[in-house]
Image (spheres, rainbow, N blue to C red):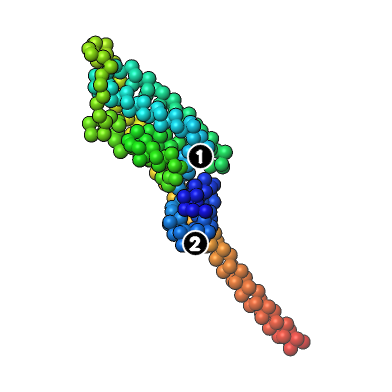
Amino acid sequence: MDVDEALDRLYAAPLDEFTATRNALAKELGKDGAQIKSLKKPNLAAWALNQLSRRHASELQELFEATHAVRLAQRRVLSGGKASALREATETRGRVVTKLTTLAGEILTNSGHAAAPATLSAITSSFIAIASGEEAAEALRTGRLTRELHASSDTGFAEGGGLTLVGSEAEEETEEDMAGRAKALRAAVNDARERAQAASKAVREAEQEVAERVRESDEADRAAKAAREAAEFARRAVEARRTESEEAETALEAAEKAFREAD
């Protein structure tokens, strides 16, 4: 077994077995196991994405193709082409993202994990993030993520987004085409804004979950402290009763002795 095979086995393992699997593989690899030993456990969203890349490779390929179609349509719109192709490509990608998010949710549920909104939002954001470059797409394709992906730009086609212009499909542009292109661009901006809002909501939900866990932990600490104090009070009460009992027995013995002497 080489390192590459070990990596595939590791990231295919159940999440709660990651650490044990990692340590076993590192030991099996011997001197080559240091690379494996240093790997961090994926978070829940990344783990679901890794399983998705293995179990639904063909559906994931649809996402890569849909993303490429959106990128090409964006270039053509910026070059003066018609906007209808961009709308269609964006809608197609949206349907693919929805399907993949549903599949990821099923993987989580079937594996005994909660498909929480924050986790699903992180997964959806990862699908959108591959538009920012081939590196992100390759990371998702290999299925060796430790964290969800994040887009490097808001829209993927704004100035500085790494896009180049391609030839227009028409010599002249009608007013209808211009209006359609403007509408498509506004829709893309709104889509980016919605993704940003969804990401912010996911962060707030995660923070609320952390706060809830902290609150529960604090309550548990207070309850444990109260239990310890109650136990200590009971222990002291027992000691007091024992002392009272011993004193009563001593007094009884003294009284019996005095009675016998008086008799």
Q: Position of residue 63 (x, y in %)?
A: 42, 30
Is residue 117 left or right of 177 when viewed as pictured?
A: right
Q: Position of residue 122 (x, y in %)?
A: 41, 38
Amino acid identity at mark 1: Arg
- Which of these two is toward me, 20 or 59? 59
Mark 1 is surrounded, within 10 Å at the Cα level, by few (under 14), some (14 to 19) or many (20 or more) other residues, namely: some
Mark 1, secondary structure of its residue: helix
Residue 195 at least partly seen: yes
Give the residue drawn at x 43%, y 39%.
Answer: 141
Mark 2, secondary structure of its residue: helix
| Quadrant housing the C terminus | bottom right
Q: Residue furthest bottom?
A: 261
Q: Position of residue 61 (x, y in %)?
A: 45, 32
Q: Quadrant of residue 75?
A: top left
Report, in whole angstroms, how far the alpha carbon at label 2 lies from the one at label 1: 27 Å
* Residue matched to label 2: 30
Residue 15 at least partly seen: no
* Residue matched to label 1: 54
Image position of 123 with respect to 217: above or below: above
Give the residue drawn at x 48%, y 38%.
Answer: 53
